[in-house]
Image (tube, helix red, strand yellow):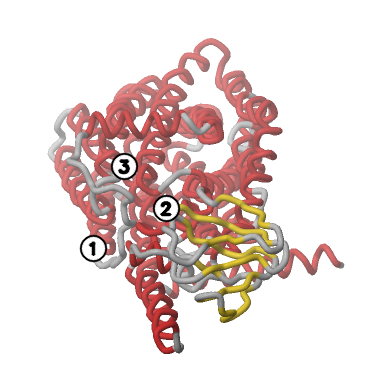
């Protein structure tokens, strides 16, 4: 009963967090724009697969998937370098417009019975900017959230929409293919892309401040800088490696859904949409279940489980090729996808600074595109060598094996982020830091120095230059002006902001009354962050003005 009660509480908390996301206008617009774009992408996957299969069978499906993904994989790091330097909402708007134009043109090509090659070329043109959509959106989302829990809820909400798009997109494609032709699907895709651009255009957000003045955009140099930053973080590179394994399975699945439906299960072309929709059903259910994980400190481990679930069900289908079981197994793949999305798009903003965040997600998308292309091109070869069932088993066993090897590192990553969550919770108690978005408060938490001060020792001295801002974690401290005791500070109180924000000597002396545990922030991190956000700057100014006014009113 206790376990059931705990699960019930987590579901209630998760449901409330998901609902709060959709009550906030900017978050709601961002989420719906994402859902529209990804529903269109799944429509495109089905329609393009059918066009390619008609044109040249399973081999054509794999080759078209590779041709579509390869340019995107190569261009994504450069495109997201730009997304880190300009407003991310504008990047998303242009992606929607370009995508609508290209896929609308593809509908015309099919309608006038031109060569399928033109359709493939237009699909590549639409996919190149699309590869930057999720990185830019993922980098925008933390700027609309205030706490790690809210960011997790936002990613759970987005995962729910992502999962719904996996269900709705293929079903819409299957319906249109049943009553019409592929060009109708392409018209629908173009319309959804334009709708996404319109939603993003209504979002109002405040970009993160930079600690250094912006330099001119140099795409190659910015891309290289982002890649160096990523390479320096071993946890991020590990997660990217696991993402590549998942994407390999995803690429294989794009071929398997067509081949299994038409040749193994003999359900025809509409069966391609039904099998793909089964992934969406599982993803939708999984996203609802993932709401239990809002606030969880084991997201890395759950991400590993999700990646394993991208492979194991394929192996089961290979061993037991029955239609109902295939639908259930693909639904499990979808549930795994919900775990992966929630984990990755919550973990990366917590591990990397905002100024390179789009490039991190760009590297992810590039790697995913390459791995999807690889998976799609090797699958026909494996089918030729081992048959459909043997290929399913071979591909399906890869992801669980790799996750097993990485499991201990995933657990260790969760432990480290859990400790940082405690720092964030303490920083959130400071009024001037409370309005900061989650990516920024994470940045501060990464740069906190923990200090210990013995009773009677001085932390800051009146008249001296100041270079740090302090938050008391535990203990008491005396605040003195000209030797006179003014007040006593305790857990959760902060000091040291006046000298940093006004660039003046310390106005007070702060001395430890008991043993003090402190969080210290260097002025290089504190000043640009607090000054760069209007709400934080207003809170900080109010604190400074109040303390200076009280000091001026006291007799000398």
Q: Toward the viewer: 458 or 214?
A: 458
Residue 130 marker: none
Badge 2 local density, few (<14 within 10 Å), some, or many (20+)?
Answer: some
Residue 142 falls in image quadrant: bottom left
| Residue 526 locus on image (x, y percent) | 42, 58
The residue that mark 3 highlights is 132
The residue that mark 1 highlights is 201
- Taking 460 as reference, is 437 left or right? left
Provide the secondary structure element on which disc 3 rests. Answer: loop
Image mark count: 3
Circles 3 and 2, Cβ within 8 Å, touching? The answer is: no
Decide if residue 262 is in sight here.
Answer: no
Mark 1 → mark 3, Cα distance in angstroms: 17 Å
| Identity of the residue drawn at 79% across and 69% down | 5
Provide the secondary structure element on which disc 2 rests. Answer: helix
Of labels 2 and 1, earlier in sequence is 1
Badge 3 local density, few (<14 within 10 Å), some, or many (20+)?
Answer: many
| Identity of the residue drawn at 66% across and 57% down | 453
Provide the secondary structure element on which disc 1 rests. Answer: helix
Badge 1 local density, few (<14 within 10 Å), some, or many (20+)?
Answer: some
| Residue 508 locus on image (x, y percent) | 49, 71
The residue that mark 2 highlights is 525
| Residue 13 locus on image (x, y percent) | 64, 69
């Amino acid at each position: 009963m206790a376990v059931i009660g705990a699960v019930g509480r987590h579901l209630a908390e998760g449901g409330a967090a998901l609902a709060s996301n959709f009550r906030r206008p900017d978050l709601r617009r961002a989420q719906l724009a994402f859902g529209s774009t990804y529903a269109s992408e799944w429509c495109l996957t089905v329609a393009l697969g059918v066009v390619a299969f008609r044109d040249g069978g399973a081999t054509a499906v794999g080759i078209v998937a590779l041709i579509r993904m390869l340019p995107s994989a190569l261009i994504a790091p450069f495109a997201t370098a730009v997304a880190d330097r300009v407003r991310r909402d504008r990047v998303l708007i242009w992606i929607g417009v370009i995508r609508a134009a290209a896929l609308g043109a593809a509908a015309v090509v099919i309608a006038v019975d031109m060569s399928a090659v033109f359709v493939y070329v237009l699909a590549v043109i639409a996919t190149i900017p699309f590869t930057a959509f999720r990185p830019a959106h993922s980098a925008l989302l933390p700027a609309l959230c205030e706490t790690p829990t809210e960011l997790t809820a936002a990613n759970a909400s987005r995962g729910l929409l992502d999962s719904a798009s996996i269900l709705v997109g293929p079903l819409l494609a299957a319906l249109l293919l049943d009553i019409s032709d592929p060009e109708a699907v392409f018209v629908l895709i173009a319309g959804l892309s334009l709708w996404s651009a319109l939603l993003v255009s209504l979002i109002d957000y405040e970009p993160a401040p930079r600690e250094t003045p912006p330099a001119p955009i140099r795409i190659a140099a910015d891309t290289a800088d982002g890649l160096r930053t990523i390479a320096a973080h071993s946890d991020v590179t590990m997660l990217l490696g696991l993402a590549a394994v998942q994407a390999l399975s995803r690429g294989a699945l794009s071929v398997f859904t067509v081949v299994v439906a038409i040749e193994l299960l003999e359900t025809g072309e509409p069966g391609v949409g039904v099998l793909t929709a089964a992934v969406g059903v599982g993803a939708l259910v999984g996203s609802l279940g993932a709401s239990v994980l809002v606030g969880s400190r084991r997201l890395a481990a759950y991400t590993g489980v999700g990646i394993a679930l991208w492979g194991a069900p394929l192996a089961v289908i290979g061993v037991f090729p029955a239609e109902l079981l295939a639908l259930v197994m693909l639904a499990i793949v979808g549930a795994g996808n919900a775990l992966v999305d929630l984990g990755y798009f919550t973990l990366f903003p917590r591990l990397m600074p905002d100024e390179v965040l789009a490039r991190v997600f760009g590297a992810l998308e590039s790697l995913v595109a390459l791995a999807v292309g690889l998976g799609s091109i090797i699958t026909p070869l494996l089918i030729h060598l081992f048959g459909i069932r043997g290929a399913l088993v071979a591909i399906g066993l890869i992801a669980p094996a790799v996750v097993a090897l990485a499991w201990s590192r995933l657990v260790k990553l969760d432990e480290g982020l859990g400790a940082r969550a405690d720092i964030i919770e303490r920083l959130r108690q400071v009024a001037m830091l409370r309005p900061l978005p989650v990516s920024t408060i994470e940045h501060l938490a990464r740069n906190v120095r923990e200090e210990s001060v013995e009773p009677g020792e001085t932390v800051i001295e009146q008249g001296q230059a100041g270079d740090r801002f302090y938050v008391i974690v535990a203990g008491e401290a005396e605040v003195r002006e000209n030797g006179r005791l003014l007040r006593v500070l305790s857990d959760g109180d902060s000091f040291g902001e006046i000298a940093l924000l006004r660039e003046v000597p310390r106005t007070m002396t702060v001395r430890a009354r008991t043993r003090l545990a402190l969080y210290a922030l260097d002025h290089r991190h504190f000043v640009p962050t607090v000054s760069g956000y209007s709400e934080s700057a207003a809170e900080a100014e109010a604190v400074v003005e109040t303390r200076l006014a009280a000091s001026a009113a006291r007799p000398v």
